[in-house]
């Protein structure tokens, strides 16, 4: 079941033959299997990325949670004020589990 969580994100796009690119946006939803977010650049379906979710934790201050991911869906967002944004869905890669306790108390 997706959890609505509106926090800033950054995405690192890997490129085997060149430098890594970075994009920024806002997380919309997260679940144990993946996430949905708005991004300031279009990614290709199948792209392997690292999603960084930035949260304010009451005890630890600013924290960054890392999710290796694969892009599964991309579409132009409707009604976005500051230029084109891309609604992007990803599936988490690897054997980690997203724990709800990790985000308890974050804003």
Image (tube, helix red, strand yellow):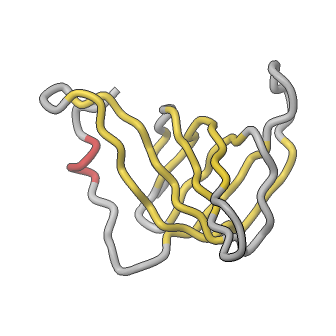
The residue nearer to you, when weighing 71 against 21, is 21
Q: Tell me where residue 97 appears, x and y as whole percent.
A: 32, 69
The residue nearer to you, when weighing 52 against 36, is 52
Taking 79 as reference, is 22 left or right? Answer: left
Q: Tell me where residue 10 appears, x and y as whole percent.
A: 55, 43
Seen at 46% across and 49% down, the residue is 52
| Farthest residue, direction left | 59
Seen at 68% across and 69% down, the residue is 15
Q: Is residue 2 above or below residue 14?
A: above
Q: Is residue 106 above or below residue 1?
A: above
| Farthest residue, direction bottom | 95
Please tell me how many numbered marks the rendered image carries.
Answer: 0
Seen at 48% across and 67% down, the residue is 68
| Farthest residue, direction top | 81
- Choose top left, top right, bottom left or bottom right for residue 82: top right
Q: Tell me where residue 5 appears, x and y as whole percent.
A: 47, 37
Taking 51 as reference, is 103 left or right? Answer: left
Give the quarter of the figure containing the C terminus: top left
Q: Tell me where residue 23 appears, x and y as whole percent.
A: 66, 44
Taking 57 as reference, is 54 left or right? Answer: right
Seen at 62% across and 66% down, the residue is 14
- Choose top left, top right, bottom left or bottom right for residue 59: top left
């Amino acid at each position: 079941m997706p959890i609505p969580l509106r926090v800033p994100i950054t995405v690192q796009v890997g490129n085997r033959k060149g430098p890594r690119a970075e994009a920024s946006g806002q997380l919309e939803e997260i679940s144990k299997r993946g996430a949905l977010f708005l991004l300031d650049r279009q990614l290709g379906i199948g792209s392997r990325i690292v999603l960084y979710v930035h949260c304010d934790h009451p005890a630890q201050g600013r924290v960054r949670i890392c999710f290796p991911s694969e892009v599964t869906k991309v579409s132009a967002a409707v009604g976005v004020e500051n230029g084109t944004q891309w609604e992007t869905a990803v599936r988490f890669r690897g054997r980690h589990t997203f724990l709800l306790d990790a985000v308890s108390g974050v804003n």
